[in-house]
């Protein structure tokens, strides 16, 4: 692949993030250190409970798949919610190897506040310690728990959506496929924020030369996919419940929202997934934000970040409340 500098294409309002966000350079040797660094609280960061006070948070432990451990969930409820309430199964990002449900508290509180929905944020097991399908099974356990306990939780079982960003978006897409094929617990909507969908990207398929220079690189991508698959990515017989882009058919999936930055490594796989969904009769909304690299939304005051929040929150409001 021919690489070029894409710095001149970065939106100026999110460019300062590149000065403070160090390269991940993920490997088996560096992964423990990166995890350790991400676990350190950011000095001066606002308290999510102060920013969005009208939400209660409860830690739940729900039964996993047979033979698997219980799954930890952070359960967010708006204090002024109506009953029965819509619900969102939320899945955090981190390339399948990083992150936790705790890291998305600000986002989950914001979603609960602005959509009046409960949010079940899944603290799924990480790769490489757990490989596919363990991660998506943890997400399925959360979906099952919401449906089985909907009456007691005051949740409308007909308005349970799934969503996530980056690897979490990939897991949300995989969860939608798994739920469709098992036909046990319906999903009303899938919210896929720059989702990680295709193991072939940067392994057997080169991204275009203006993608993936920043934050999440081709090398990181290969490491993430090798970690969840348990072998090198891009080969034969990769399950769609690990890499949703491998699904032979997307027919019957729920209405979908997809957003991605124009400089994100996942740009082409996300556009292709949206194209396939549209061609197979799935109502689909696609947004590409110019000048956005992977995780650009960590700059909350940038205009493209405000547009991103506006678009996906409004999409959730429409699906939840008509």
Image: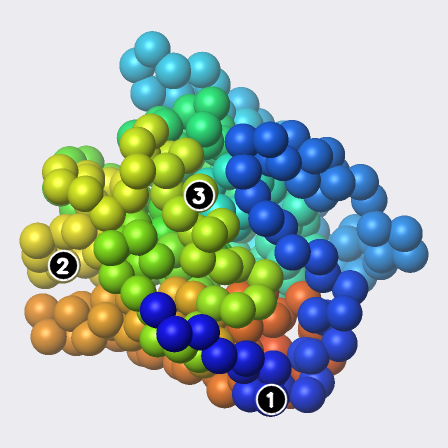
Tell me the mark number nearer the camera, choosing from 1 and 3. 1
Q: Secondary structure at mark 3?
A: helix
User: Residue 58, image x and y in percent?
Assistant: 65, 35
User: Residue 55, image x and y in percent?
Assistant: 69, 51
Q: Check the image and name the residue furthest to the right.
A: 44
Tell me the mark number nearer the camera, choosing from 2 and 1. 1
Distance between mark 2 and mark 1 Cα atoms = 36 Å
Q: Nearer the viewer, residue 141 or 236?
A: 236
Tell me the mark number nearer the camera, choosing from 3 and 2. 3
Q: Is residue 97 above or below residue 320?
A: above
Say few, some or many: other residues with alpha carbon within 10 Å of mark 2 (under 14 / 14 to 19 / 20 or more).
many
Left or right side of 124 for 15: right
Q: Residue at x 39, y 21 (%)?
A: 64
Is there CB contact under 8 Å for labels 1 and 3?
no
The residue to which callout 1 is attached is 8
Is there CB contact under 8 Å for labels 3 and 2?
no
The residue to which callout 3 is attached is 224
The residue to which callout 2 is attached is 250
Marked residue nearer the N-terminal end (2 or 1)? 1
Question: Is residue 177 something that shows in the picture?
Answer: no
Q: Residue at x 45, y 31 (%)?
A: 127
Say few, some or many: other residues with alpha carbon within 10 Å of mark 3 (under 14 / 14 to 19 / 20 or more).
many
Q: Considering the image in quadrants, where does the C terminus appear?
A: bottom left
Marked residue nearer the N-terminal end (3 or 2)? 3
Q: Check the image and name the residue furthest to the front.
A: 2
Say few, some or many: other residues with alpha carbon within 10 Å of mark 1 (under 14 / 14 to 19 / 20 or more).
few
User: Residue 90, image x and y in percent?
Assistant: 48, 49
Marked residue nearer the N-terminal end (1 or 3)? 1
Q: Is residue 311 above or below residue 254?
A: below
Q: Secondary structure at mark 2?
A: loop
Question: Is residue 266 something that shows in the picture?
Answer: yes
């Amino acid at each position: 692949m021919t690489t070029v500098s894409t710095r001149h294409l970065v939106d100026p309002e999110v460019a300062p993030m590149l000065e403070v966000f160090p390269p991940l350079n993920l490997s088996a040797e560096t992964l423990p250190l990166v995890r350790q660094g991400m676990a350190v609280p950011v000095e001066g960061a606002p308290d999510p409970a102060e920013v969005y006070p009208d939400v209660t948070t409860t830690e739940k432990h729900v039964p996993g798949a047979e033979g698997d451990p219980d799954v930890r969930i952070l359960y967010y409820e708006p204090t002024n919610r109506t009953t029965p309430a819509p619900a969102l199964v939320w899945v955090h990002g981190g390339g399948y190897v990083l992150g936790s449900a705790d890291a998305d508290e600000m986002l989950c509180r914001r979603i609960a506040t602005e959509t009046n929905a409960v949010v079940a944020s899944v603290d799924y097991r990480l790769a490489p310690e757990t490989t596919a399908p363990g991660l998506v099974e943890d997400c399925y356990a959360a979906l099952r728990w919401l449906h089985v306990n909907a009456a007691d939780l005051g949740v409308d079982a007909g308005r349970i959506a799934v969503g996530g960003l980056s690897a979490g978006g990939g897991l949300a897409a995989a969860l939608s496929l798994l739920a469709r094929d098992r036909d046990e617990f319906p999903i009303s909507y899938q919210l896929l924020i720059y989702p990680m969908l295709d193991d072939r990207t940067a392994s057997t398929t080169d991204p275009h030369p203006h993608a993936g220079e920043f934050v999440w690189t081709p090398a990181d991508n290969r490491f993430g996919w090798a970690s969840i698959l348990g072998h090198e990515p891009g080969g034969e017989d990769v399950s769609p419940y690990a890499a949703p882009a491998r699904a032979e058919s997307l027919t019957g999936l729920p209405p979908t929202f997809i957003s991605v930055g124009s400089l994100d490594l996942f740009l082409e796989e996300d556009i292709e997934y949206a194209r396939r969904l549209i061609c197979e009769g799935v109502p689909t909304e696609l947004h590409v934000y110019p000048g956005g690299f992977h995780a650009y939304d960590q700059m909350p005051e940038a205009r493209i970040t405000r547009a991103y929040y506006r678009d996906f929150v409004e999409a959730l409001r429409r699906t939840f409340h008509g």
